[in-house]
Image (cartoon, rainbow, N blue to C red):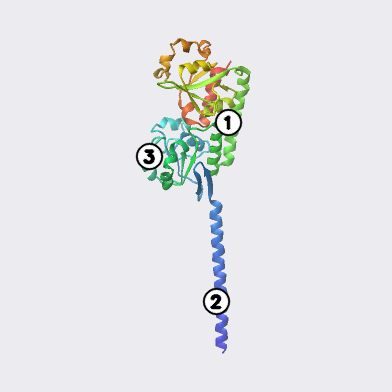
Amino acid sequence: MKFYKLGKKSLIMSVMLGSIVLTGCTTQANKEENLDNKNQIVVKHELGTTTLDSTPENIAVLELSFLDSLYNLDVDPVAIADDEDASKVADVTEGELTEYTSVGNRKEPNLEELSTLDLDLIIADTSRHSEIYEDLSKIAPTIVLNSIDSTYDEYIENFKTIAKVVGKEEEAEVKIAEAENLLSEVKAKAEDKVSNKNVLTVSPKNDGYTAHTSSSFVGQVLEKAGFTNAVQSEDVEASLSLEQLVEIDPDIIVYMREDIDTTIYEEWKDTELYKSLKSVKNNEVYVTVSRKPWTQYRGFISVKTLMKEMSGWLLEE
């Protein structure tokens, strides 16, 4: 009889101990799950929401503006769509980044090469990579941001998003403040010297000119720096014939490519219409050293280059 009671007590104690153990396991599991959730990074982007389990280390960028963002956050991507031109990476990173894997052209990145890398994150462009988003997402978590058609303000928002992903939000605010200070400094000079003049930024092609409007990255940067864009439009670009160029008749022309002699400019420059332009008559026509910072990079390196060249042409004593 005593043996039965002792067994019953033992059974009750075993059940109680078992419950305690199970409760402890459940509590520990909940703690671990909550910790995992706390470490997760939820990123809203152009094509949806991507969740990362932790801060990514091995990152691939498919546009140069994203490289610019990471460089300014002191993060080196392991893979870059560099158009198989290492000089572009050198430009954006001021010669500091030399070791990375090229994954081909920005327009058509090499998916096979990307799949061989142990990537934690891919950063892609809306215009160029939306159609391959699912393919990219199978390789690694992917976020899609607007780069090609972005304004300066959109670049800043993208920069903040990327900073959040890599845990560098405070560093991002410092870089943004530096850029804003530079733009403000140039604006103070521009308001004094060119406030009554407008600027046409164009890239000559084989059959006409492509102007970057007030809504483009270049246009918005210049307007923030006190320059008035000659083409005010919600469209990022505007195609111009010679007649349309004459109709605009800008005070200042900036050619955003160094090889204008290989374009329709060669045909237009000797015409009476072209010679009738105010900018031509007043010798207010300028040619950039390189097209890349003006038309391809769209980041802080572009801001620095634009401010340096515009100041040198128009604002120096």
For mark 3, give the secondary structure: loop
Q: Which of marks 2 and 1 is nearer the N terminus?
A: 2
Q: How many labels does the image show?
A: 3
Image point 55% across, 64% down: which residue?
26
Q: Which one is in front, 57 or 165?
A: 165
Image point 50% across, 20% down: which residue?
254
- Badge 3: residue crowd in 10 Å (few <14, some 14–19, many ≥20): some
In the image, residue 7 lies at what x, y percent? 55, 83
In the image, residue 232 lies at what x, y percent? 55, 24
Q: Is residue 27 above or below residue 76?
A: below
In the image, residue 230 lies at what x, y percent? 55, 21
For mark 1, give the secondary structure: helix
Residue identified by numbered label 2: 14
The answer to whether marks 3 and 1 mark residues whose Cβ atoms lie closer than 8 Å is no
Q: Residue 145 carries which label?
A: none
Q: In which quarter of the image is the N terminus?
A: bottom right
Dot 3 amino acid type: Asn
Q: Which of marks 3 and 2 is nearer the N terminus?
A: 2
Residue identified by numbered label 3: 110
Dot 1 amino acid type: Ala
Residue identified by numbered label 1: 179
